[in-house]
Image (cartoon, helix red, strand yellow):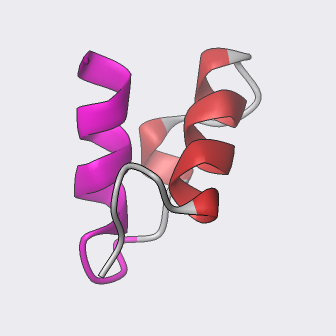
Amino acid sequence: MFTENSKLVKDYALLIQNGLKTINDVPNFQNLREVVSNVLTD
């Protein structure tokens, strides 16, 4: 399970914030997409 402090979550959030990826590019694996989405909305 991923948390907001997971390296992969932070990496995807950074890529999305910089316009290099979208939330749809995040694999729907375990809770990864959900946690990345939560990080972006906080």
Q: Work out whether residue 42 or residue 27 is closer to the camera in this orientation and state it.
A: 42
x then y, percent, for residue 39:
34, 33
Residue at the extreme front of the image, as rendered? 5
Say whether residue 24 is magenta: no
Instruction: Identify which residue is drawn at 76% across, 29% down.
Output: 20
Number of marks present in the image shown? 0
Q: Which residues are magenta?
A: 28-42
Q: Nearer the viewer, residue 5 or 18?
A: 5
Q: Is residue 16 above or below residue 11?
A: above
| Quarter assignment of residue 19 | top right
| Front residue of 3 and 23 | 3
Residue at 63%, 60% (x, y): give it.
7
Q: Is residue 23 left or right of residue 18?
A: left
The quadrant in which the C terminus is found is: top left
Q: In the displayed structure, does residue 16 sit left or right of residue 32?
A: right
- Tell me the chief SS of the magenta region: helix
32 left or right of 20 in image: left
Please say if 41 is above or below 34.
above
Q: Quarter-wise, where is residue 13 in the image?
A: top right
Task: Establish if 20 lies above or below 8.
Answer: above
Where's residue 15, x and y in %? 71, 33
What residue appears at the point 46 percent right and 53 percent down from the top-left corner? 5
- For the N terminus, the image quarter is bottom left
Residue 33 screen position, x and y as percent: 33, 57
At x 24%, y 71%, the residue is: 31
Residue 4 rendering spot, x and y as whole percentages: 37, 49
